[in-house]
Structure formats: structure tokens, C-alpha cells
Amino acid sequence: MFLNEKKEIFLEQKKILNDCYEYLKNIKKNGIKINFSPLCFFTTWTKSYGYFKILHLRKKKIFFDFLIFYLKNIFSILKNGSIELVYEKNIFKKKKYRSLVFSYCEKQSFKNSIFFDRYFGISSSEISETIFFLISLDNFIPNKKCKNIIILKKKISFINILIFIYFFFLIIFKSKFNLKKFFHYFNYEYFFIVQLNMLLKKIFLKIKFKNFLINYEGMNFQNFFLEKIKKMNKNVQTIGYLHCAPWPLQTDLICKTRSLDKLFVSSFDQKEVLNKYYKWSKKKILTIPSLRFNKLNNNEFSNFIFLPIYIFNKKKYLEYFQDLLEFLANSKLGQLNTRIHPLNKNSKQHQIFAKELKIILKKYQHKINNHVKNISIFIGSATGVCCQALEQNNIIYHIPGDHILDVFSPYIWKNIDVSLVDNGIFKYSIRRKNKIFYTNSEKKKFTKYIDPHLK
């Protein structure tokens, strides 16, 4: 019976992809840049314009949920005001660099005014002839400005109606009073691109570089960044690095840009999937060990309940969680702890959800077998962490929010075994190691695997 369900999940996922491609084709005909429109960035794991577009293509009822999301997004234009660049005043004395690295930073990224990039596994002091362009995730700026670092941060401001009015009329004229175009561009994501464009002019007129490296996730402003650089100098080599392990349906990675020359991934299966299902050229994709993660001896993903980034249906999750514990209570239940995604560590909603899971878990305390060490439970979308846990020989139990969007298909991911535990609960195991996520314990991996490809 489950063979039919596995086939159905695969066929539905393929249909979603085909619908996305057809939608992109029609949008292009209307003169809308699919690189920059958030309605063309199709996420499956969190609420976004692209997520609601997928639901719309699947003929789901989304009006009220989308309306709330849309109003919050538009309010973000008012609330978040504008952005600014922070850098050491003499940074542009040097006119030429070998590389520019685009990435993210936060307070913990800095030590003694040296920046460490956890995605690329490099520090600002260890690679020469390089300038870092960073988006501050927490608006932290180190007291002592670094010589080769430019940081983008939000300006601390109150609600700015003037900026909102300016952007509103800018998009009206840009869309030439076309309502469809207006809807694609009048949002916070494109507002960020407009601001970014004004700031980038200040940088690119002052420095030159041969290589541009980006922590790539297919996002609209990343595609804008790439296109902007290629327009200014077509000889700059653009290199993306996908730092995370695969997730089930990667519609957000549909290839929408020709401005990326090379894409490094840390998964042999990922390379095949990007080529076969997401229209990436195999020639552009190179497989290397993860720069961000090392091969670990201890099992850091074992005996955890991983909470979703976005809690779509808490009641459903709690019901299925209890059903799963009933199944595992027969000698398969080990000590379990909840694990909240770092982006949501301060979220009250996630903290309450974690407490509710612990209350249910407490009922089964007498059934716990301390010898069971290799079980992980994922709620919501099966994220890249799920693949990391599989590579460490964990058995994964998965409670998806949506059977089609959230579940790994073994027809796509050839090295993941999928079985059905109960209605609404799936089980994963690995077939061949180091295929879905490739790690090792080498040092200076950036120097060994990336540097030889730079001009």
C-alpha cells in the first residue's frame, strides 16, 4: 500500500515543479524579472510569497492567511526604515582586491575585530586580497572597525512614512500602472533590493575584484547582487556555495540566474537532483566536502525532537507526536530533548510548543530505554539537518505538516529509504554514506577546495 503512496508523493512533487516552471514562463512573458520577484522564490518550509504561490497552484484555500501575511510584509517597509553601510574610513584606499565575499555576520562572528565566516569556514585575517561584504543579522557592529570588512545594517528609526510613499510611487511608475507588475514589486523583499542597489553603487565605483563569492540560497537579493556585478564587469568570476544539506522539495533552488558561473555543493546526490529537477547545468556544479561542518565522532543529532522553523498546525503535530510515542514505546523510545531552530530561539510560540511536547513525553517516561541512542524526530519540514542526522546513522521519524511539500521522496533522493510508520508519520534511513551530505575533518578546506578555482 505504501508503495502507491510513495509514488503519489513523487508524482505530486513533480507536478508542483512543472506548475512552478509554467508559472515562471508566463511571468516572463509579462516582462517581470523572475530573479527579483519574491512570488518566484518558492519556499516549502516557511511562509513567504513563494510558499503561498505554491499553495495557490495546488488550488488550496489561502485568501485570509495570505492577506495577513501580505499586510505584515507591507508594514515591514514602514517599520524597518532604511539600511546603511558601516566600514573603516580608509577601506577604499586600496582599489583592487582578488575577491569579494558576500555573507552574513552577527555578534558571535567577531573576536578581537576579526570576523569568522562559519559558512565558508574562513576568517577575515587568513585570506589575503579579500574584502568581505556582510549583512548583520542582529544589527551588531564591532567597536573597532575591520580593515577589509563592509557591514550592512538597519538604521535605527521609527516608522518612516516618507520612505513608504516614495517606494509606493516608485513601483507605480516602474510597473507602468500594471497591477500584476505592481504586486510583484511592491513588497519588502523588493524594497530591500532598491535600497541595496543605491548602496552598491558607492562600493563598486571605488573598488575592483576578480572573484565574487556568495553564500548562495537562491534568494532574490542574491540574484540581484550577482546580476549587478556581471553588468558592471562581465569578467568577474561569480561563485556560489550552498552551505546546507538537502531538504525534500527544493523549489527555492530552481535555476533562475545565468549570472552564477560556479555552484559548490556538499552532496553528490544534490548535484544530480539540481541538474535533473531544477535545471542547473552539471558543468556549473562542483562537489566538495562541507566547508561549514566537519565529520563528527559524537552523535550530536541523536535523541532530539527538532521543532519546525514555522509551526503551521500545532494541534496536528501534537496528536501525531503522541501517536509516534505510542509506537516507539515498545523498546524503541530513548531519552529525548527538544531542539529549537537558532532563528527561533527567542520565539515564545516555539518555547510553548517545546513545553507541550515535553508534557506529552513525560507520560512515557517509564517506557524510556536508555540504550536507544540513534533516534531523531523531526516535526514539520524535513530540513538539511535531517540529512546530517542520517549521515550519522540515526533513524529518523518525521511528522510532516504537508505530506507533499515536507517529505523526502526516494525516487528523487536515491540514498534515502522511506517507509510509513503510521498515517502521517514517516521513517527514514540511509543507504550509502557520504552521498546525501559529504563531510570530512580536514583543515583549511577553503584553501584546498575553493582557492584553486579563483582567478
Image: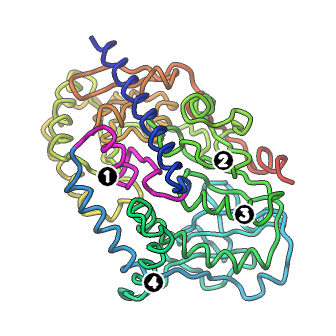
The numbered dot on residue 166 is 4
Secondary structure under the numbered disc 2 in the rendered image? loop
Which residue lies at the image location 44% right of the left edge and 61% below the top edge? 181
Q: At which x and y percent is residue 117?
A: 64, 61
How many angstroms separate mark 4 from mark 1 (CA)? 32 Å
Q: Which residue is mark 2?
A: 291
Assess disc 4: are there few (<14), some (14-19) or many (≥20) residues with their C-alpha within 10 Å of its C-alpha: few
Foreground mark, 1 or 3, reads 3
Image quadrant holding the N terminus, namely top left
User: Tag 3: residue type?
Assistant: Ile
Q: Which residue is mark 1?
A: 310
| Apparent side of residue 23 relative to residue 224 in the rendered image (left or right) | left
Q: At which x and y percent is residue 403?
A: 30, 32
How many angstroms separate mark 4 from mark 2 (CA)? 42 Å
Callout 4–callout 2 Cβ contact below 8 Å: no
The numbered dot on residue 229 is 3
How many angstroms separate mark 2 from mark 3 (CA)? 24 Å
In this rendered view, identify the residue nearer to me: 55 or 452: 55
Which residue lies at the image location 17% right of the left edge and 40% below the top edge? 316
User: Tag 1: residue type?
Assistant: Tyr
Secondary structure under the numbered disc 3 in the rendered image? helix
Report the magenta residues as a range: 36-60
Secondary structure under the numbered disc 4 in the rendered image? helix
Above or below residue 362? Residue 393 is above
Q: Quadrant of residue 210?
A: bottom right
